[in-house]
Amino acid sequence: MPLPTEAAPTPTLFVDLDGTLIDGDLLHESLAGAVRQDLGVLFRVPFWVARGRVELKLRLAELDSVEV
């Protein structure tokens, strides 16, 4: 009896949307959406920026999703 095999993982496609699929910067769009939902975000942004651009993007992604 043959052993069951694991299915190959589905490859993931990452696409840079800024300036190619959307006319703008996704970071700016995310920031604007997050601020519209909660003005307090403006006070937290400098702390996120101090920890790096990746931290800023992660935090904004948690708060707002941009419809493309």
Image (tube, grey):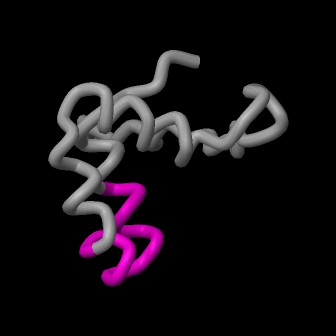
Name the foreground residue: 20 vs 38.
Answer: 38
Q: Picture quarter containing residue 4?
A: top left
The residue depicted at 23 percent of the width and 49 percent of the height is 41
Q: Main secondary structure of the magenta part?
A: helix
Query: Residue reaching furthest right?
Result: 20
The residue depicted at 21 percent of the width and 40 percent of the height is 39
In the rendered view, does 30 fall on the left or right side of 41? right
Task: Residue 5: give x, y in percent of width and height.
Answer: 34, 42
In the rendered view, does 13 fall on the left or right side of 24? left
Name the foreground residue: 11 vs 30.
Answer: 30
Q: Quadrant of the C terminus?
A: top right
Is 39 a magenta residue?
A: no
Span of residues in magenta: 47-58
Number of marks in the rendered image: 0
Q: Picture quarter containing residue 45?
A: bottom left
Task: Residue 58: give x, y in percent of width and height.
Answer: 33, 56
In the rendered view, does 44 fall on the left or right side of 60? left
Name the foreground residue: 35 vs 25.
Answer: 35
Rendered view: 51 above or below 64 = below
Task: Residue 21: give x, y in percent of width and height.
Answer: 77, 27
Query: Residue reaching furthest top?
Result: 67
Rendered view: 16 above or below 32 = below
The residue depicted at 24 percent of the width and 35 percent of the height is 1
Name the foreground residue: 22 vs 47.
Answer: 47
Task: Residue 50: give x, y in percent of width and height.
Answer: 34, 82
Rendered view: 65 above or below 15 = above
- Residue 30 visible? The answer is yes
The residue depicted at 21 percent of the width and 62 percent of the height is 44
- Residue 2 visible? The answer is no
